[in-house]
Image (tube, rainbow, N blue to C red):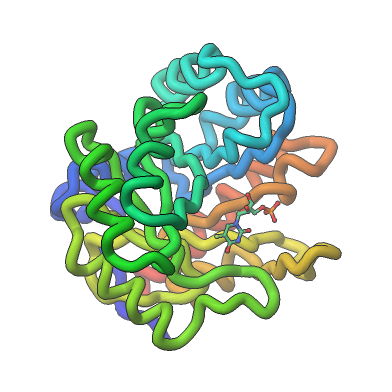
Amino acid sequence: SIQKVMSHKERAVKCCHPLVRSLYSIMNDKETNLCMSVDFTSSEDLLQLVDKVGPHVCLVKTHIDMLEDFTTDVTQQLQRLAHKHNFLIFEDRKFGDIGKTVHTQYQGGMYKISSWAHITNAHPVPGPGIVSALAEVGKPLGRGCLMVAEMSSSGNLATGEYTKAAVKMAETNKDFVIGFISQSRLSADPDLVHMTPGIKIQMGGDSLGQQYVTPKMAITERGADVIIVGRGITGVSDPVGAAKEYKQAGYSAYLNTLNH
Ligand code: 5FU
């Protein structure tokens, strides 16, 4: 069972990290806890869908290295759309190397992730040094990081003591770590945002290990603050209709948690 959650409105005022307050303020204003994952290979497809679905989401999650035609214009357009529709950008980079390496990967290379992504994430596997290195780049820019504390894929190793260590890394670095990628409520601290991928109204999975739960299960049973939906939106003939459906399902489940 999960702790009683603070409302988005309260968290938009009380949370300690400015980025978290912005996120909850967007969620409160737009009445959505939906993050769309746009895992496209074409920039034009990505930008077109983000422009259409933008009004219904609090976050857009990218895997920028999936694009076959990446130019810096894409991330500029993405930032323009984030401003137009009032959402934040989350690059699902899952950094996972020693401090020195992730510092360069986050700040530089072709993608310059820290320059446009409000939020990114990291695997705890290298130890706390990964957080200090990413923070050195991201903190001065007001960025935030999520620890990948649990995963949705079948047979994954992010369990038990590993997950506990991820929670500790978050709780002791709240000036940069703003929460988790998780499958359950891991921390009672309202400052830490729990984002859950592996969401589909039809449940099931795919042929490569993905496992789905419904928006309602993720929020009411597993304590998610934000639901991350990819193919449930991007893989159907009417993505805007689907986004509205996920937004509705996610938000009514959230409202239910407030009444209990
Ligand atoms: F950390 C994780 C995880 O545990 N499961 C995930 O599915 C990240 N993901 C990402 O969420 C994954 O890389 C996809 O980008 C997205 C889920 O997409 P789907 O199409 O909804 O399965």
From what the image shows, is residue 100 above or below residue 186? above
Query: Where residue 257 sits: x, y (%)?
Result: 40, 70
From what the image shows, is residue 38 above or below residue 73? below
Q: Quadrant of the C terminus?
A: bottom left
Query: Where residue 13 sits: x, y (%)?
Result: 16, 48
Can the viewer see residue 104 in this picture?
yes
| Residue at (56% x, 18% y) in the render | 74
Quarter of the displayed picture in which ligand 1 can be seen: bottom right
From what the image shows, is residue 49 above or below residue 191? above
| Residue 217 lies in quadrant | bottom right
Left or right: residue 163 compared with residue 67: left
Q: How many marks?
A: 0
| Residue at (42% x, 80% y) in the render | 162
Query: Where residue 24 sits: x, y (%)?
Result: 31, 47
| Residue at (59% x, 22% y) in the render | 51
Q: Quadrant of the N terminus?
A: bottom left
Residue in the foreground of this view, choosing between 218 and 30 = 218
| Residue 29 lies in quadrant | top left
